[in-house]
Amino acid sequence: MYYRYRPFSELSIKELMYSELFLASTEECNDPYDSKGFYEFTGRQDYWENLVNLLVRKIGNNNVSGLQIKEVAGKISSLCPLTYDEALLLDISRLCFEVLKDFTLSQSLAACFNQLLKIYKPEPSYFACFSKADNDPLMWSHYASQHQGYSLIFKPIDGKLRQYPPLKKRSISRKTPNGLAQNSSYGLPESFSFQEVIYQEEVKSLCGFHRLPVAVIGGDLPEEERINLITLQSEQFLHKHISWDYEQEVRVSISPRMSWIFGKNIELSSLERLFYYEPTQLVGIIFGARMPKGNKDRLMEVLLYRQEQLYRSEDHERIMFEFAVFNARLSGSKREIQVEIDKMISSGQEIDKSHKNFEHAYDRWRNGWGIKFEGNKSNRIQVLG
């Protein structure tokens, strides 16, 4: 089970009602380093020579000699190490002019350099955050309106959160006149994998040259090195400083890649980052210890309506689970949060702890039992995790 802490607000109620999941950007998070990729350019002369040579070819100038390329590369190399962000701000026109003595050519090379780095810069990652903890006081304070909000309980299926088939987003398209075609698309997954965040003290920067076209490093990497590089680049989106480890975070994310096909680095709009998850994978809620009764009543009305809608006829395969309602309570003897079961919702009906079917329903819920529907067929199955 994974927990998604929410404040009580009109927006969060709307998200609950319609099974919405918004994937945030780094700029929208309280951690400015969240999902940030760290890359560094070293002073390797051969890589810089390959890059300058690539720039010369791109602008179509045949009058730059190999010796001049070597000199320009040496001047840039002397500025290293450079982070990717520092390289993006670098204007190499002056360095080029010192060697080439041609203002127009120097300006063209500098513009091409900047454009190339922009296209291949670390792609943005968009993500929604969950936690493995249901009773951490800081999580309730920071992300659930000082214990007045709530936490949604999600059940992963095969380690994933599925898109809701009737409202599934399949791809994101762009007009790409500078790409390989006039229009290009980025395919979206049918399900989002839950990935655990990796907490670490120090940042381990990756090689900035590996972001650029293969000509810069002088050839394709061996398959094992290529796979290792892809793994390290993907893991950077999951790295956070150790000070955040209390969150016990798990996240789902997307990161549009293949900028070389699009001819530009792709960023997604707010609408493109709004998804609808399979509503049957929301299997419970925890009301905050300070949530007013009126707000609980309002959420229960939404939950009952929502659960009733799940039993309407659907064509797609889905697994139905009972729904558990918990209350968080502030302990009177310790500084801790205690989470206690209050009631179950089964087949759209409330079952409190005094009901004869409560224990059976709660036991099925705890052990991951649900009913799998496939067309007109149904059977009870156990989903672990």
Image: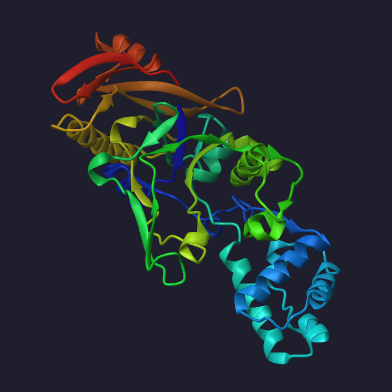
Q: Which residue is found at the position 52% from the left and 57% from the top?
A: 28
Viewer-nearest residue: 80 or 163: 80
Q: Which residue is found at the position 55% from the left and 60% from the top?
A: 27
Q: Which residue is found at the position 35% from the left and 48% from the top?
A: 275
Viewer-nearest residue: 80 or 126: 80
Q: Which residue is found at the position 83% from the left and 69% from the top?
A: 79
- Horizontally, residue 89 falls left or right of residue 331, namely right
- Horizontally, residue 196 falls left or right of residue 77, namely left
* 341 lies above or below 253: above
* 99 lies above or below 328: below
Quadrant for the C terminus in the image: top left
Question: Looking at the picture, how far across and down is residue 350, in whole percent?
Answer: 23, 23
* 90 lies above or below 27: below
- Number of callouts: 0
- Is any part of residue 199 visible from this angle? yes
Quadrant for the N terminus in the image: top left
- Horizontally, residue 23 falls left or right of residue 65, namely left
- Is any part of residue 208 visible from this angle? no
Question: Looking at the picture, how far across and down is residue 379, in whole percent?
Answer: 23, 14
Query: Which of the 4 image quadrants contains residue 191?
Result: top left
Question: Looking at the picture, how far across and down is residue 12, in whole percent?
Answer: 36, 47
Query: Which of the 4 image quadrants contains residue 317?
Result: top left
Question: Looking at the picture, how far across and down is residue 81, in whole percent?
Answer: 81, 61
Its colouring scheme is rainbow
Viewer-nearest residue: 89 or 7: 89
